[in-house]
Image (tube, grey):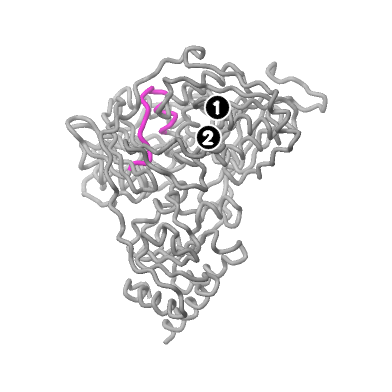
Amino acid sequence: MPSILVYAELSAGKVATTSLELMAKARELGDVYAVALGSGAKEAAASLGKHGAKVVHINEDKAFDDYIAEPATDAIASLYEKEKPDLILFGFSPDSREVAGRLAARLGTGLISNASDVVSNGGSFVAKVPYFGGAKVASMKANGKPAIVLVRPKSFEASESGGAAEVKQLDISVADSSKRAHITERVVEASEKVKLEEARVVISGGRGMGGPQNFPLLEDLASALGGAVGASRAVVDAGWVPYSMQVGQTGKSVRPGVYIAVGISGAMQHTVGMKTSKIIIAINKDAEAPIMKMADLGVVGDALKIVPALTAAVKAKKNG
Amino acid sequence: MPRFRRSDNGCSALKIVVTVKQVPDPNSSLTLEADNTISREKEVVLDPGDECGVEEGLQLKEAHGGEVVIVSMGPERAKDGLRKALSMGADRGVLITDPGLAGADALLTARALAAAIKAEEPDLVICATESYDGSTGMVPPMLAELLGFPQLTFAKKVEIDGSTVKVHRQTADGYQVVEASTPALVTVTAGIAEPRYASLKGIMAARSKEIKQVSLSDLGVEKSEPAETIEGVVDAETRKAGEVIEDDGSAVERIVKVLAEAKVL
């Protein structure tokens, strides 16, 4: 059996959902180990055990919370030397990819990122990587020892398999030379009413919204439907809305019951983060926009008229 | 700190390296070659994210004095991208070009860049958080590791105070303040600074600025085994196109029906 090490990303002391998704896949591939670093690692180990980890290596040094990438890289590199896992899985998230990049450079192995699946094939691992607007999927055999693969969020369903992990203290003291990029303050700006990743309905706006002044129209519709508002990279880069709202390859991945794309053309950068939504509705002036080719219902028209009318209709139906 | 030189305005002069590359024009659609690779023959432009990196580098230089060196990797024509950065005001460029780099993976790219950047002994390396074409953002952390620098990432604001670099690091719900001593590597988000237009004077001046061309052997970098071997390419499972309707006033009713069927209303 190949041995698989999952890097369990902790956020606010809890295991990130993406890491639990990786556990589900890792169970299919071999013997699963996990590593959890920083505050909450102990509690995380219990959760990782339920999701199929045989052993969880933990270290609760606060340096893992407070310094970017380097302490975690040191810890995983030392664990690699001891355990020699065949495959190390990371989520494709901002924090994880920074650790994975440093680790791959340190081990001199390279990595495969942005994968949507991993399969085992005669002792090696093959990652499925979408590209070209998500229209093509390349099968890439990992040549590195260890193989390091970063997997997109929402690629697998997290599920408990029962069981408890053996918890092992990872014996490492973080060197001062790795305490460099120091997080000295954490500022919360956006408090989301409904979490984008968990919303049943997501309404996202793009350039076709005309400007930031029109985003409240989407907020109104979202609150009528109990959903959340997202955005395309173009309008985040333009400064219309905060990054926390970005859906797509470099933003959040969502999989709601209904996704309503308003004034979004449907560049791959965006669609890769929402195309597994159950139902997609697109509202766009351009009948030829790529989003129309993937929407279950495409409406060609003026979003600024349709959205408020839709909000009114939703409210009327709810009250009626 | 011997690496800091005092400049006329009393601030520490900075040596800044900004990495750039060219990407297929984001405003044009991509095409595939017969072997399923993305066509590189298309119109290419300086990566819009890199333009923001160049702008940030120039603003830091304007505030603190010093030099902005642009480092790029690519075929001969990547000089166009370098030239654009020079016309915005950067001081000189280095182009790593070598047939051995065709199809280079992130690690080989990072190794080549690290070798070229080490020779510059910078105080600060600025990269875009991720490229517009690959969008995987793997090169910057690799580069930081190979340079032995701390990485301050997703910066939407960068400040330098003596030998301390401080950034506002964008997070899902706000930002973190992150500090480190130089030398350091910073990745910047696209929103950090509106790239300036090159002035005519800048364009003229860029023509005489130096672009040093180096090969892998000049840098002492050996080609490594690529991280992956492509075993095959298939069409992704696509969503079937649904119904497309013109809004003749009935669209709202149709949408409400779909929402009701999906049981979200």
Given the current orientation, which residue lies at the most extreme bottom position? A320
Q: Quadrant of residue A99?
A: top left
Q: Could you tell me residue B57's position as x and y percent?
A: 66, 33
| Count of numbered tags | 2
Q: Amino acid at mark 1?
A: Ser
Question: Which residue lies at the image location 50% right of the left edge and 16% below the top edge?
Answer: B215
Query: Which is nearer the N-term, disc 2 or disc 1?
Result: 2
Q: Residue at x 64, y 32 (%)?
A: B85
For disc 2, the marked residue is B22
Q: Which residue is mark 1?
A: B72
Q: Is residue B218 left or right of residue A278?
A: right
Chain letter for mark 2, please.
B
Q: Which of these two is toward me, A302 or A45?
A: A302
x, y percentage for residue A48?
Answer: 30, 44
Are there few (<14), some (14-19), or many (20+) residues within 10 Å of tag 2? many
Q: Chain of mark 1?
A: B
Q: Quick one: label 1, few (<14), some, or many (20+) residues within 10 Å?
A: many
On whether disc 2 and disc 1 are found on a single subunit, the reply is yes
Q: For the point 70% across and 33% down, which residue is it?
A: B203
* Relative vertical location of residue B248 with respect to residue B136 in this rendering, above or below: below
- Tell me if residue B41 comes above or below residue B223 in the rendering: below
Q: Nearer the viewer, residue A21 or A155?
A: A155
Find out whether the residues at labels 2 and 1 contact each other: C-beta distance under 8 Å: yes
Q: Given the image, on which type of amino acid does mark 2 rest?
A: Gln
Helix, strand or loop for disc 1: strand
Residue A242, percent from left and from top: 56, 54
Q: Quadrant of the N terminus of chain A?
A: top left
Query: Residue at the spot x=29%, y=49% of the render?
Result: B236
Asked whether residue A44 is in view, the answer is no
Looking at the rendering, the stretch of residues picked out in magenta corresponds to: A100-115
Q: Is residue A107 magenta?
A: yes
Helix or strand or loop: what does disc 2 sit on?
strand
